[in-house]
Image (cartoon, rainbow, N blue to C red):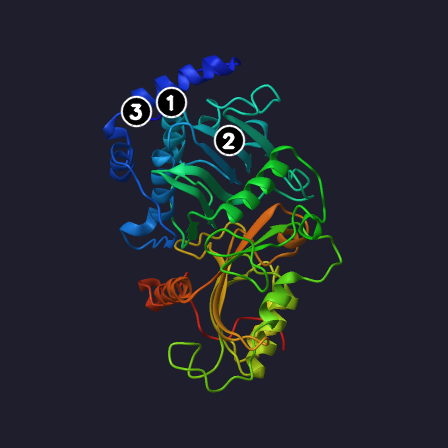
Amino acid sequence: MLFRYPTVRSAFARRLLATAAACCLTAAALPLVTQEAARAAYTPVTRAIFNNPYTAAQSAVYDEIVRLVDGADAGSVVRMAIFEARNPAIGAAIQRAIARGVDVRVVHGSNSGVAGGSDPWTYDFLPARTEANADASWHVACGSVPGDACVGTGIMHNKFITLSSVGGVKDVVLITSQNWWASSPFWENAMVVVDNSGLYGKFNAYFSDLALKHKNDDYYSSADGEPVSYNADGSVAASGYGVYRNYFFPLATGKDNPVLDMLTRADCTARDLPAGLGHNGRTLIRVAMNGFTRGDIARQLAELDREGCVVQVIYHVRDDGGNTSVVNAFRCSTVQRWWKLSGEGRALPKSVHSKWFAISGQLKSGAREEIVYTGALNWTGPAIYANDESLLRISGGATFQAYFDNFSTIVHAPEATATTADDWKTTTEPGGSC
């Protein structure tokens, strides 16, 4: 059991208690991966990480977060923006980091807990941020309901971490779809980028605006939130997109949906792409999306499929009719999709909680690329136009292949061929019209 103690107002006393808590964590109380991470130095590398709820990799994202925090060098700074935090292994890693001289700063928003935060154990060892402790460890609660976002008008839904130094590796960024729940029952993903000072600095600037609650309902379009591209060495890309490009939300209501622009860069007229790019000579678009209610995006995907792209989608059909416009756009199209019913009170074991999409093939610019967009951004109106959200674009065949393979793993999992109520279906969706 995680060490617990009464609420303490003194920041100094909190640090002492955090040290005591870290010292009192027994090996028996921690998962094996956490024990190993605590003992050994960790050298992170740029890579994609995926949960598989059917295998030992069901906690892969959690395990990486624990390794990174446990590997944070003394004197370094860890910044975390997380919607829900209820995972005791991560909470214990934070305490260990603080005990050895790491400053840990957390911005959070959640469905439960003190001051709109998550479960009390996550933050009772972190004082609230003040000007006096701004350069130490602290937390900021954004709140728990629409209207409580730190920057936007919805919720603070981000899920990213930056670490200044881990095992001597500098400027580390992790962005994920996963909240810090107690367990890991869903398909999730994370992307780790190391040694990229430009991307690291941009995420830190956004984190600062979240922590200071600099309200801006058009953050995406502002000078602070402007999408910027970085090369692999961390320099700003002179033109085009570079290897990485950041996107921070919200976007002002009424402005054009940027996801449509990202998708329509695909050239669906290509028919002779070389082997290893696209699918059978055509541009390929793959989507694994938890929250999908935007009919405009679904219609755009259907149109791209009609134009000649191969479009494949994993998504949920809401039984409350909340995404009828999406269902109507898909059900009479030739978009290849895998779906299952979801809704309030409906248990969806091993469902997709990821929010990523990827393009392999030719772009209208003439370039032939493989691109992944991933992060916390669902395809919903609140996500794009109200919430504090982040999205990362990654260019490169190795990253695309990892996400391509993840898609295939999901749809070929045991659940996809079982005859259960939660089976992934390839039949025409129920109800709706064309």
In the image, what residue occupies the spot 30% across and 40% down?
A: 42
In the image, what residue occupies the spot 36% across and 20% down?
A: 21
In the image, what residue occupies the spot 43% across and 52% down?
A: 191
- The amino acid pointed to by label 2 is Arg
Q: Is residue 41 above or below residue 239?
A: above
Residue 105's label in the rendered image is: 2
Determine the secondary structure under disc 3.
loop
Q: Nearer the viewer, residue 49 or 57?
A: 49
Q: Which residue, given by chain and number where applicable, does mark 3 sit on?
A: 25
Crowd tier of the residue under label 3, counting other residues whose Cα lies within 10 Å: few below 14, some 14–19, many 20 or above:
some
Relative to 53, is 129 on the left or the right? Answer: right
Q: Which of marks 3 and 1 is nearer the N terminus?
A: 3
| Cα separation between marks 3 and 1 | 12 Å
Do callouts 3 and 1 mark residues in contact (Cβ within 8 Å)?
no
Q: Which of marks 3 and 1 is in front?
A: 1
Q: Which of marks 1 and 2 is nearer the N terminus?
A: 1
Q: Which residue, given by chain and number where applicable, does mark 1 sit on?
A: 99
- The amino acid pointed to by label 3 is Leu
Q: Which of 75 and 220 is in front in this view?
A: 75
Q: Earlier in the sequence, mark 2 or mark 3?
A: 3
